């Protein structure tokens, strides 16, 4: 599946993932008959510098596992991850300090990713100290600047994370991620626990920072309408595999994979013009199967409305049907 | 004479806190007729669930305090009922689906046992007495929510089922005996979008088939647009706008409704709006005026000191905002339109 990486773009790839597989052993089963949760099962994608790549999928499809594997929190079974052309999986899955400086992550639940016993100042100081961004005597000034960057008042530095609201907590997480002056940020559902009015604020902040600091985002979400408005390309995942990758506009106007069509048709929308974008006559059925017993052939065939004989026998390959638009389906 | 199925009048629900009373629900008026479908939309913490819990009187009485208001169900005031009468309402008239299906089901009993309990608790006249009949009713209820192999499901414990299946079981339990009113508290929020779509379609079909009235609580404008006939928009314990679904999306009037609609990311693209300035107000020391006034872009002096009343601007479309009163002069509106253009 190397064709995914052969796209003709002048942009340089900041991150490319090849044939990544992350399996988790199911506990309790005998060693001879090990069963695995195939959380990520052969994923190829790349991100160009300055891009916002959206990674979409239902819960349990392996989106977050990819993020955690890039960060070094999981050890992959197979595959390679190149960051700026350098293989980061060598050296026994240890990440270099420069990688840790360049790549940051913002988690879904800000309540559990900020230490409740530290105040905001302490939380923001740590990355500044570890990566030696500023001399010691300018730490307080740098913390204040970090708060300015996300437009939080400076007096926040003496509050604890438990005393501020959900949206503000997420802004602190973003400020913390920006402290080390990274090039690439993984956003793992940063707004899914927030209300829409707060979400709009956070997203605007993220887009502003993207332009100002020349960042690259891997944006993980399950919200396709949100993705439409912020990403440059969208990749959709189902049971540990990517089904379809396309530039955002093409992805929403001419989706090819039946799963993409099912997802788009399920979204509750608020206007007529959106209604017209939804694929007609696609009705969502069934549930995502267990990743321990992945169906044979194409893993989506149990829910697919256009299934033919070959689908339950042979797993389709990723094919490029127009420039930059990849689909993994026998019918495409 | 009042012919509404449920009529909530000026309901106030406060919570006791160490700082004083948190005035969470602040004068809610709401009516629903038999067989109708309405939706309550608002952000988290605006009092949607508290209002509905007040209707069923399932709030913790040590913490909740209801200083004012009436909740009339078929002309009987629920707030003045004795426990035995209340039990009758819960047995036969109103049921509720909660947001988190895994928390709503008891993990130590089988699904079958829990459905049997609901049937026997309801004490309908035609309730089956023996286990065979109970099983038949339960199996039919599970078939109604499109779960295959109901016999096996009856023997399952909740942890053996997926989130979508559990929510279907909750719906089956809520509708296993005939009810006049179903309160659905964000039934799809904890689920994936494809499963959410299935649950909503199922809910609509069942409610239509059984002629049950539905109150749908949600934070998603898209969900109410597809499910209900009339929408109540709630902000910080107040109903700020009421309109039929078509009218509300065609002509939203309250600044909060407009702000909320702008915030929803569109599938058709076009970027994201700036969000609504500020945060949900403090409930312990709320402003005496309109509770949206600290965040409102059109705020005037009167908004800060006086509470706006519900005003009917057109047939079936009411809004609580001074912008639409006569005293809010033409001049103000002109100023605004100039401001908007600039």
Image: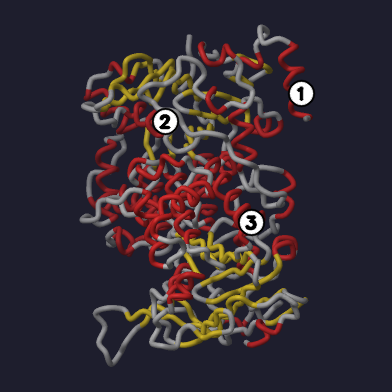
Q: Position of residue A60 (x, y in %)?
A: 45, 67
For the residue labelled by badge 3, is the local secondary structure a helix, a strand or a loop?
A: helix
The chain to which mark 3 is attached is A
Q: Identify which residue, B141 or A175, lies in the foreground.
A: A175
**How many other residues sit within 10 Å of disc 2, few (<14), some (14-19) or many (≥20)?**
many
Q: Position of residue A303 (x, y in %)?
A: 55, 69
Residue at the spot 36% in from the left edge and 79% down from the top edge: A24
Q: Which residue is mark 2?
A: B47
Q: Which residue is mark 3?
A: A212
The chain to which mark 1 is attached is B
The chain to which mark 2 is attached is B
Q: Position of residue A307 (x, y in %)?
A: 62, 75
Per the model, the C-alpha gap separating discs 2 and 3 is: 39 Å
* Residue B123 left/right relative to B40: left
**Is the N terminus of chain A in the top left, top right, bottom left or bottom right quadrant?**
bottom right
Confirm whether residue B140 shows in the render: no
Residue at the spot 61% in from the left edge and 59% down from the top edge: A213
**How many other residues sit within 10 Å of disc 3, few (<14), some (14-19) or many (≥20)?**
few
Rendered position, A240 above or below B185: below
Q: Identify which residue, A180 or A90, lies in the foreground.
A: A180
Residue at the spot 69% in from the left edge and 49% down from the top edge: B271
Q: Identify which residue, B326 or B209, lies in the foreground.
A: B326
Q: Which residue is mark 1?
A: B337
**How many other residues sit within 10 Å of disc 1, few (<14), some (14-19) or many (≥20)?**
few
* Residue B307 left/right relative to B259: left
């Amino acid at each position: 599946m190397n064709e995914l990486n052969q796209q003709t773009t002048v942009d340089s790839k900041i991150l490319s993932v090849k044939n990544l597989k992350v399996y988790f052993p199911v506990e309790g089963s005998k060693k001879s008959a090990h069963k695995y949760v195939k959380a990520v099962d052969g994923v190829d994608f790349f991100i160009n510098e300055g891009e916002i790549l959206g990674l979409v999928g239902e819960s349990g499809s392996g989106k977050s596992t990819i993020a955690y594997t890039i960060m070094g929190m999981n050890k992959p079974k197979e595959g390679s991850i190149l960051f700026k052309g350098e293989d980061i999986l060598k050296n026994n899955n240890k990440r270099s300090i420069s990688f840790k400086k360049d790549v940051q992550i913002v988690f879904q639940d800000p309540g559990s990713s900020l230490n409740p016993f530290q105040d905001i100042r302490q939380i923001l100081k740590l990355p500044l100290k570890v990566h030696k961004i500023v001399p010691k005597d300018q730490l307080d000034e740098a913390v204040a600047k970090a708060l300015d960057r996300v437009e939080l008042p400076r007096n926040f530095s003496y509050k604890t994370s438990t005393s501020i609201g959900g949206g503000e907590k997420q802004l602190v997480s973003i400020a913390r991620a920006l402290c080390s002056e990274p090039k690439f940020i993984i956003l793992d559902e940063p707004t899914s626990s927030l209300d829409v009015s707060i979400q709009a604020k956070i997203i605007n902040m993220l887009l502003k920072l993207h332009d100002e600091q020349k960042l690259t985002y891997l944006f993980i979400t399950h919200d396709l309408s949100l993705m439409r408005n912020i990403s440059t390309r969208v990749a959709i995942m189902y049971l540990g595999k990517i089904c379809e990758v396309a530039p955002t506009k093409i992805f929403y106007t001419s989706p090819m994979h039946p799963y993409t069509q099912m997802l788009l048709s399920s979204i509750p929308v608020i206007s007529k013009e959106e209604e017209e974008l939804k694929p007609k006559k696609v009705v969502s059925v069934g549930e995502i199967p267990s990743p321990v017993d992945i169906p044979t052939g194409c893993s989506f065939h149990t829910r697919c409305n256009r299934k033919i004989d070959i689908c339950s026998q042979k797993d389709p390959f990723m094919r490029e049907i127009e420039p930059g638009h990849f689909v993994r389906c026998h019918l495409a | 004479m009042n012919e509404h199925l449920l009529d909530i009048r000026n309901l106030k629900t406060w919570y006791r806190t160490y700082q004083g009373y948190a005035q969470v629900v602040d004068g809610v008026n709401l009516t629903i007729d038999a067989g109708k479908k309405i939706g309550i939309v608002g952000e988290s913490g605006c009092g949607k669930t508290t209002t509905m819990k007040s209707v069923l009187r399932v709030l913790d009485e040590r913490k909740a305090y209801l200083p004012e208001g009436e909740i009339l169900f078929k002309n009987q005031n629920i707030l003045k009922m004795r426990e035995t009468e209340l039990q009758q309402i819960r047995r036969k008239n109103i049921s509720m689906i909660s947001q988190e299906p895994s928390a709503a089901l008891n993990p130590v009993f089988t699904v079958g046992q829990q459905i049997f309990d609901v049937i026997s608790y309801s004490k309908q006249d035609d309730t089956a007495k023996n286990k065979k009949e109970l099983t038949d009713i339960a199996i039919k209820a599970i078939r109604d929510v499109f779960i295959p192999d109901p016999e096996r499901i009856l023997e399952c414990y909740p942890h053996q089922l997926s989130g979508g299946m559990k929510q279907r079981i909750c719906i089956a339990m809520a509708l296993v005996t005939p009810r006049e009113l179903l309160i659905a508290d964000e039934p799809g929020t904890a689920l994936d979008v494809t499963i959410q779509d299935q649950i909503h379609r199922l809910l609509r079909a069942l409610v239509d088939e059984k002629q049950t009235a539905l109150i749908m609580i949600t934070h998603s404008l898209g969900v109410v647009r597809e499910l209900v006939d009339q929408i109540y928009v709630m902000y910080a314990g107040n109903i700020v706008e009421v309109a039929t679904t078509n009218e509300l999306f065609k002509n939203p009037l309250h600044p909060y409704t407009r702000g909320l609609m702008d915030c929803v990311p569109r599938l058709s693209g076009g970027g994201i709006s700036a969000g609504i300035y500020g945060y949900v107000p403090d409930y312990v020391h709320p402003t005496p005026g309109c509770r949206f006034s600290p965040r409102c872009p059109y705020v005037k002096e009167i908004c800060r000191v006086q509470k706006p009343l519900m005003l009917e601007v057109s047939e079936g479309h009411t809004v609580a905002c001074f912008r639409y009163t006569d005293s809010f002069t033409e001049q103000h509106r002109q100023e605004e339109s100039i401001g908007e253009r600039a």
